[in-house]
Every structure is written in C-alpha cells, then in structure tokens.
Amino acid sequence: MLFSFIPLRIRTYLLQWLLALAAGAVSVTAFAPFNYGVVMLFTLALLFHLLWQTENLARAIGLGYAFGLGLMGFGVSWVYNSIIQFGGIGQFIAYAATVGFVAIAAAYYALFAGLLKRLGRNTHKLIFTLGLAPLIWVLVEWLRGWLFTGFPWLSIGYSQIDWPLAGYASVFGVLGVSIMLAWSAALLTLSRDIWPLVMISLLWFGGWLLQQVEWTSAYAQPFQASLIQGNINQDDKWKPGQLQKTLSLYQTLTQQVPESRLVVWPETAIPMFDIHVEKSLLQPLHQVMRQQQRDLLTGIVVKKTDRHYYNAMISLGVSGRDEYFKQHLVPFGEYMPFKPILKPLLDFIQIPMSDFSPGENQDGLITLAGHQAGINICYEDAFPNEVLRALPKAAYLVNASNDSWFGDSLAPHQHLQIARMRALESQRDFLRATSTGISAIISHQGQLRQSAPQFAQATVTAMVQPRHGVTPYAFWGDAPLLFFVMSSLLIWLRQHTQRKTKMLFMRPNPKENPQ
C-alpha cells in the first residue's frame, strides 16, 4: 500500500480526522440558504460516534477541532469578504485574518470534545452520548455566544427553523432547539435498538405539537408597513458626492408607498451625522410624515460630542421623534477593543465610522404606527436577550442592518435565518430592513411574508399584526435550560469523582497481603 509505512493507528486516526472535518463542512448545508436541516442530525451523530471510539484525550480534541474547522471554515468564510472589500488592506492580510478567526472559532468545538472525553472517560456509551454530549454541546454553544462579546453564529438550533424541532424555540429558545437536536443525534448513535428511534420520533413529534401552540395573541387591526432597500454600494455609501443621490432615492421610494403607516430605512441609511442634516433633511421629513399621518424609522449616525457618536435609529412622523442607540457593537468593525493598544490597527484597516460608542441600557422601545416596537440594529438580533428585552411591551420587532459588508456570500442568508428564529422565540412579527438585502417581513411563526432579492432596489410591503402576551422563553430566557445543564453536569462530576475515589481506596494494598 502507498501509506503502508504509516502505523495503522495513525492511519485510522487520520481517516477519523478527515471524516470529522468533512462532517463539519457538510453541516453548513443545514443552514441557510441550503436549509437541509436534517443533515445536522447525521453529521453531529457522526462526530459523537467518532469521539466515543477515540480513547486518547488529545486525539478527541483534534477531532472536535477538525469538525469546527470544517463548519467555521466553510460557514463563516464571508469574514474574508468584509475584510478584503471594505478594510482597505491587501489579500495576504485578509486571508491571514480570516484563517486566524476561523482557527479561534473552531477552538470551541475542540473544547467541547475535550470536556466530553474528560468527563465521559470510562463510562458507558449511553451515558457518554446521550447523557453528556448534548449537555456539554449546549454549554459550549452558550459560552461561544457570551465570551469576548460573543459569536453565536451557526448555533445548530438555527438549522432547524423549517423543521419540527423549531417548535421548542418558543419554550426554550435556540439553545433549547440545539439540545433537542443534540439529543436526537446522540440517540441516532444508539440506533441498533428500536427504542432510540422511537425516542427521536417522540422528540420531533413534540416539536411539531409545540409549533401548533399560540403563546401570544393578536390585538388591534393589522397595519401596512414598508421596508426600503436602497441597494447603495458600500464602496460609494460614504462618499460626499453620493449623499444627495442616496437621500433622493430613499425619499422617492418612500413616497411610492403612501398607504404604509410605517416605513423603515436600513442601518445608517443616512450616511451622515444627524447634526449636519437636521435642518435640511430631518425636520422637513418629520413634518411631511406627520402631515401624512405616517412614521419613518431610519438609520443614522448621531453625534453627541466630538468623541462620542452612535449607530442609531431615529423615528420621525406622527408618533413623534425618538431614538435608539446600538448597544452591542461589532469588535473591530464598530469599535476597537483594547483601543489604547490596538488603535494603530484601526487606523490601518480604514473602516469608515468604526469608532462608535455603545448606547446606554435602553429597552429598545419606540412607538411606531400607534404601537410600541422593539428596535435592534444589525448584529444585535444574533443575541436573544438583546431582542427579548423589549418584551412583553413590544407589539412587534424591527431590525435594521447593513449586510452589504458581507458581499455575495452566505452571511445575509444566515442572518435572515437568525432573525426568523427571534420572531419564533418571541412570537412577534419581525421587520428586517437591510441596505442590499435580504430585507423581509417575518410572521410571528418565523415564516417569510414578503422578502426582497439581494442587490436590487426594492420595497418590501406587507401587513403587520400587533401582538401581546409572552412566550415561555421570552418570560424566563435561557436561565432554566442553563440551570438544568450545569446542575446535571455538576451532579455527574460529583458522582464520577466519588466513584473514582471509592475505587482508589478499594484497591488492595500489597503490604497488607504479604505472600
């Protein structure tokens, strides 16, 4: 054989490593725009099986890392688009930065594998896969969404938005969907018996039943809303000569939907400090919308002092003027962490408007079209708690984004999928206005009512139904699930430690039994 000089154990491990890498890469098809959610069931089951077969802790960590490299390497490769197109740096540095980002993101999967193998050492396969793997997986997913400001992208629960397990979202959130999927994958590894298949069927049937439950209820009459997608090229957006063309376009498209009580422009649709357009644009727009008995919500940069400016949404029109400042900023894109040390890097990459200040602790509520709306900006909708803080007062939700940073990649589709999950978790209609797509109006069940194609000037118009009430997840958040996961792992760790200690003391002492 060609590789006969390589020891059999090493060849076996290399094959396992490549299988884990391939499983991670194929898992990307479970997410948007492919939406083959069932794929994740099988790829995750394969990973669990490989980790069970591997005896060595270091090799298990390597397998987890390989899965993470495949998933993140293919799933978030769009980071390169953002850096190379709009960072003003060369290809080599862009490649290096992307590889570094993927390498760090993949480390979470290595952490999962290491914890699973360490805690599950010398246990039965049933405990290893069904008892420990789903708990540790969700714990690490939660950690990834929190540590270093968080990066919850491609949490496996999102892959199930069009599948029965999505029913658990309104009760336990996206992490709850993740743990149900992980349990299903663990059961699949035990499928030589009939009972695991029965349990999988029950889990998925339970999700379908929960999809039929209306946790919130409609009130008042629905109203018409429109989202304006200007499709302004990111390279041109901040050029002074483009400003009047941009403003004229958005105003023209707004006047073409006179029946819409609410019109939403995207994040930083007005690429200018508010103080520079207050008299020439904002005040006249406010008067026009008031006369028409309508409201306009638009993205703009609000400048408070010479050192502090904010990524903001402001409302104009019949409901009065109000504002919301983005609180969860994107590291390196909107602010520089460890700024005294890394400021030269910020100056080098030359991203426009990349030194925002975070907003204060607002609930995100702005009255629009006669109802309170929960406002969030771009990346904030990837964090459930930052969307749910507006509930139960918010009758519907609004997100304004600028996904042109991602170019023609998977990211805008994945971002829309995340917004759909937020709508389902809260059971609120969700309006999502983006600069270049994908703008969409999403129903309270997470389904698309209307959407616009990417890279086209478009207006998305649909009826929005105000709702009140609260889903179990909006009421209690992630706390019950995390308590269950952590307490279960602590109980297991305590029992496992006691068992090991007992076995240590039960070992015969050679000195007490001389031959």
Image (cartoon, rainbow, N blue to C red):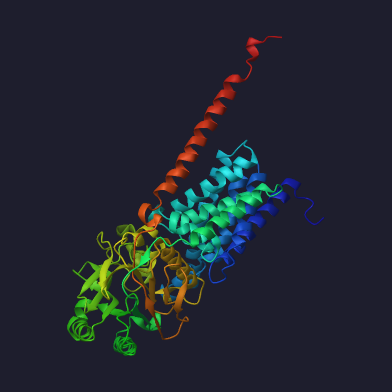
In the image, taking residue 368 as reference, residue 138 lies left or right, namely right
The N terminus sits in image quarter: bottom right
Residue 151: x %, y % from top left:
44, 59
Taking the image as drawn, is residue 482 in sight?
yes
The correct choice, above or below, for 357 with respect to 253 in the image is above
In the shown orientation, is residue 204 left or right of residue 326? right
Q: Which of 167 and 19 is in front in this view?
A: 167
Task: State the residue at coordinates (48%, 61%).
Answer: 101
Who's the residue at 57% across and 43% down the image? 131
Q: In which quarter of the image is the C terminus?
A: top right
Q: Position of residue 386 (x, y in %)?
A: 34, 60
Describe residue 208's horizontal placement relative to residue 482 as left or right.
right
Along the line of sight, the residue nearer the viewer: 138 or 146: 138
319 or 185, which lies in front? 319
Q: In this view, does 117 lie above or below 204?
A: above
Q: What residue is shown at x 42% (from left), y 76% (from top)?
A: 440
Mark count: 0
Name the residue furthest right: 1
Residue 23 image position (x, y, % from top left):
63, 59
Q: In which quarter of the image is residue 73?
A: bottom right
- On screen, 132 above or below 142? above
Residue 332 in view of the camera: no
Residue 484 located left or right of residue 363: right
Q: Position of residue 239 (x, y in %)?
A: 33, 83
Residue drawn at x 41%, y 72% as measured from the top left = 87
